[in-house]
Amino acid sequence: MAENNPTEVKDKSAAPAGSNGDGARTLLGVTIDPDEIKKKAQIDLDALKQPTKTEVYKSIFRVKHDQTARSRTLGVLSNVFLHLHPAKVNRDAVRYNFTWGMGGISFYLFWVLTWTGVLLMFYYHPTKVQAFRDILYLEHDVPFGKLLRNMHRWAAHAMVLTVQLHMFRVFLTGSYKKPRQFNWSVGVILLVLTLLLSFTGYLLPDDQLGFWAVTVGTNMARATPMLGHEGPFGPELGMTPFNDVRFALLGGSIVDANALLRAYIWHCIAIPGFAAIFMIVHFWRVRKDGGISGPAPIMLEKEIKPVRR
Amino acid sequence: MDWHQLWTIVSLPDNIPIVGMLFIIPFFTWYALRQARANDRLAERLENDPDLAKTHHRKVQPFQKGWVREVAVWPYLLRMEFLAAIIVTIILMVWSITLDAPLEEPANPSLTMNPSKAPWYFLGLQEMLVYFDPWIAGVVMPTMIIIGLIVIPYIDENPLGNGYYTYKQRRFAIWTFIFGFIILWCSMIVIGTLIRGPGWMWFWPGMTWDHNRLIFEINRDLHEIVGITSQPWIGIFGGLVVGGFAVAAGYACHRIIAATEFSRKILNRMSLLQYAIMQALLIVMLALPVKMAARLLFRIKYVWVTPWFNV
């Protein structure tokens, strides 16, 4: 046997290493039996045919993928991305006609905007010198830059629309009623944040369109009662163009470099952060308030119970 | 009829959402009200047939004994979500490939855009600037809209219609929301986008946007029409007019709120605070169309002039 014959290992240049009569060889003192290796390789090959049986797969996906109710439930509950869902849902709620899917689509658009937005940030400097040139660079030189910018803008427009439609649907189905009152209020905040996100993004290309839209928009802040220098009781309280609420928004008395930087930070960091926090609460409360509101059984007028105070 | 002008406005890439809105909002309104009508018919049937009401599953969707009431999220809901994500992605892709995001000249503070418009979703607020001073249109009204929306669940004491479409069980709530959302918010956006041209002047669809157009309209304040010329009488008069409007609007709203036996029943459930908040919000909401009519039909600029603010 090979392990009893150390001289053959030293002499590996003369003959194939470790060759002997029954097919096993030794290499650096390790026995190599081709039949054994073939057997082991077969195990690995068999595993490839059934990847779901491997330890790697089982460590990642802890649940079997079959049609039993248990597996389907665990498939949702044990997945971090899906665990916001309940295991089961009202059979009529999966139809399109009740929810119109607008809440989910809004969330999906938020993700599209986050991804395209992060990619846009790689090419954008929020400075007066660079901002407009960066947009031209994106449009003409960056591969797929134009597509990226178009997608960010149209997804933003679409999101403003879908958020409004979501609110419209929730109102018409009375889904804000007990016990979901608070979640409606959170939703209104999210609507406002959506509008503010879109509005702060408007200035960033630093073109005439954004500049004048933001000028018109922030000029209204001059007229804020008590906090604006042209608003009712503003001057009486010591408001000037250099210390009122508009000055705080723009970082100056005109829409200029500071306003661009502030819009950028609000747009890319602050408001998305707030929106994320409110979205966490919103989705959490959807579950805690009993999941999707309907389609619920109809209640009749004579079944109204008196108010308890 | 200047079709080219109309096309120029409608085909502006940034105006696509509004053009889409012209179809999407009516579609979903119809879609919701159709389901509401189906539910209302069922409710009527169950009201007239108490025995059926005890056994019926109370939905228009089919249901039979032995069917499960809940289905697994995986796959029945997740496949819908996945499908929706794919469809939205395709729409976005096609939209982004075919239409370019607008980019104007570099920002130039010395060259004013005419008309210079806010993003489309704020055009309702910008349109409001025609009828109110900026502190109302730009600050008070948006704040009232946000507060009004937030308090809706806390002032709506009608327990019916929780989780299903209905019209008959929530007539007042649905009319109020449709009035606020479609008649005021959406149509003001459409006016701001499609109607308002250079100098924020009113151009009917198909009229050429003439940058040299002048309109010889003299806007008057209400007290000038009446013939009051000096403060403090101007302020007192205006205060009385605005107060009178609030009382009249509040009375009209109350008549509508208490119009039917059912709505009186709901009214009795409300606390005084809930009623007061609802009335205040309704009066402010009604002030907009009233002021619009005063301005567009009677060319009245202010109804209340004081040394500190004008309404």
Image (tube, rainbow, N blue to C red):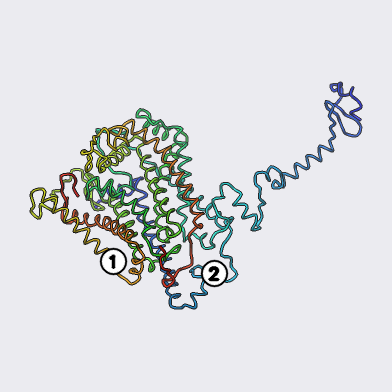
Q: Which residue is mark 2?
A: B63
Residue B268 image position (x, y, % from top left): 34, 67
Left or right of A78 in this view: A24: right
Residue at the image position 22 percent from the left and 54 percent from the top: B292
Residue A11 image position (x, y, % from top left): 87, 21
Q: Which residue is mark 1?
A: B256
The image quadrant of residue B21 is: bottom left
Left or right of B216 in this view: B277: right
Asked if labels 1 and 2 touch by Cβ distance under 8 angstroms, the answer is no
For residue B34, say whether it is visible: no
Q: Is residue A290 above or below residue A109?
A: below
Type of amino acid under label 1: Ile
Circle 2 chain: B
Type of amino acid under label 2: Phe
Q: Is disc 2 in the same subunit as disc 1?
A: yes
Quarter of the image with the C terminus of chain A is bottom left
